[in-house]
Amino acid sequence: MLAVDLKNPKIASIRESYGKALVKCGAENDRIVVVSADVSSSTMTKYFSESCPERFFNVGIAEAGMIDTAVGLALEGFIPFVDAFAALVCNRGLEQIKTCVSYANANVKLVGTYAGISDYKDGPTHHSVFDISVMRAMPNMAIMVSADPVETAKMVKIAADYKGPVYLRLSRADMPVLFSEDHEVTLGKGSILLPGSDLTLICSGTLLYRTLLAARSLEKAGISSRVLEIHTLKPLDTEIILKCARETGAFVTIEENSIIGGLFGAVAELLALNNMSVPVEPIGIRDRYACTAMDVESLLDFMGLDPVSIEEAAKKVFNIKKAGEKKK
Amino acid sequence: MYTEKQITELKKTATWLRMKSLEIIYKRGAGHPGGCLSAAEIIASLYFSKLRVDTSNPSWEKRDRFILSKGHASAILYAALALRGFFDLNELDRWGELSCHLQGHPDRNKTPGVDMTTGTLGHGLNVASGMLLAARLKNLDFRTYVLMGDGEIQGGIIWEGAMTAAKFKLDKLTAILDYNGVQLDGSVDEIMPLEPVADKWRSFNFKVITVDGHDIVQLLEAYDEAENADRRPTIIIARTVKGKGVSFMENQSKWHGVAPSKEQYEAAIAELKKKGKENAGC
């Protein structure tokens, strides 16, 4: 469950959480192995390399080969976590993921670290803003996006236990801790974190804290916003999204990914397939590259992923919904 | 040492594999004849002498693994798997039908005996490395054989796999290069030369054995020699002829990925039968 002081949140590192969760899972399950492309000191799989050196394989800066090597381990019954920056896992390794992971249905856990625009220092070459779009199109692939360090640890365990390819998307950023340890995460299940009736703010991943801030502000303005977290992009919890569409009649989708093919794409496709006319406004990256910045927060603001933009989008869809109701 | 009888049988098998792969390519109207014909002795000597497999248990944990990294030579792999007994020979006639388990390129989830899905080039060496890292963790002593095309090794990912295999001293890896010198658009020398290819692999810390890829004895001896590789992976550079055995297909890039017409198919089979008889008599 949510356990955050919005005014003064505790901050913790996603990658620290990932690295420590892998150590824990590795101690419990000796089939877990890590194949890394020389980034273990950045992604914190160095902890696993220290605790299980015989099950840690650094193949150098060779992401494509890394993925295929992991496939070989998976075919022999191991559970490889493949570990590199999301920008490289999902782009340089794309053909390997398609043929050898997705099509061959190998039990590989692809972990895209430094995802979104969280690597603010290195700029667009290191940003990963359409990894979700690409991975969503892959048959057999489960996709999870973590919103905080607590969820990150739980998702590592879920990925390890799940039989089949998984893409786990992690930010580089230090994030507000949003959830208590008893927070339940189930693959393929969305969670309504805040009740509300005027509209639904659907958030996937790292912008959840900003979404909660926007919801609080909207409440003060007299707009009751439901907050739905969709941490699993695939399989999508279609039931809960359609329920929110019926009950609130207006959506804002919020993601640190391109709106083409990401959460917005998934929600818009679902509504269209179900002939539901619901106003949807996306908060996400609009078909452009970001830039280098001094810190991640200012870059998120610069790209329009800020609480005020979420509020404005919410007011927009709420007004469209009200105008539609008046016509009836 | 191998007996004359064994060698004669393997020669016959190679000829049969050539004829069968051409037959199913002809019947389907699609496939890659040139690279099947060049690999006939390599495949025959592996599947009918060297590989430790159990056709009644295709996923037997201790089996040797084989990855056809040049997956477009699927016709000859399917012919070998059927003849070896992984599935019924009649199923070869259904290759490519919507409900058939035999895909255009090998599919591990559909075809018994296929250890890894391939088709797009460059995957075999890396996947094999992963398999052998797993074998080491599990204390299993199987070998993994990877058959690559010469054009295939122009792609950089091959060399990523080569470095991984060498770094982890994967001496249970036997890579085989079907060095027929011809690829889709022309000769390898013209498109992207590989020479000095043996030096390349040596410098990547592979044990290198060069053989005539149509000489069964040389191939068998090379497979054996690879087993004493002193903590190094091995590559067997097999000099072959694209389209081997069918005179009008030999060394012709146009026969990389085209099915023969009825007349061409019949002429090819007649020639292979004639040569097969000559071989059996010698």
Image (cartoon, rainbow, N blue to C red):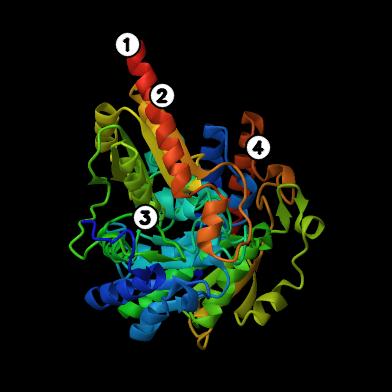
Report helix, strand or loop for mark 3.
helix
Q: Quadrant of the C terminus of chain B?
A: bottom right
Q: Chain of mark 2?
A: A
Report helix, strand or loop for mark 2.
helix
Residue closest to the eye, A308 or A170: A308
Give how far across and how far down residue B257 sits, in percent: 64, 42
Kindly identify which numbered label has been placed on residue A328: 1
Q: Earlier in the sequence, mark 1 or mark 3?
A: 3
Q: Is residue A115 visible?
A: yes
Label 4 close to label 1 by CB (< 8 Å):
no
Residue occupying image coordinates x 44% and y 62%: A171
Q: Amino acid at mark 3?
A: Tyr
Q: Chain of mark 3?
A: A
- Whether labels 4 and 1 belong to a single chain: the reply is no
Q: CA distance from mark 1 to mark 3?
A: 36 Å
- Residue under label 4, please give it: B267
Residue occupying image coordinates x 32% and y 47%: A216
Q: Is residue B5 visible?
A: no
Q: Earlier in the sequence, mark 2 or mark 1?
A: 2
Label 4: how many Cα within 10 Å (few below 14, some 14–19, many 20+) = some
Q: Is residue A71 above or below residue A321?
A: below
The residue at the far top in this view is A328
- Residue under label 2, please give it: A320
Give how far across and how far down residue A303 sits, in percent: 56, 49
Q: Is residue B131 above or below residue A141?
A: below
Residue closest to the eye, B80 or B280: B80
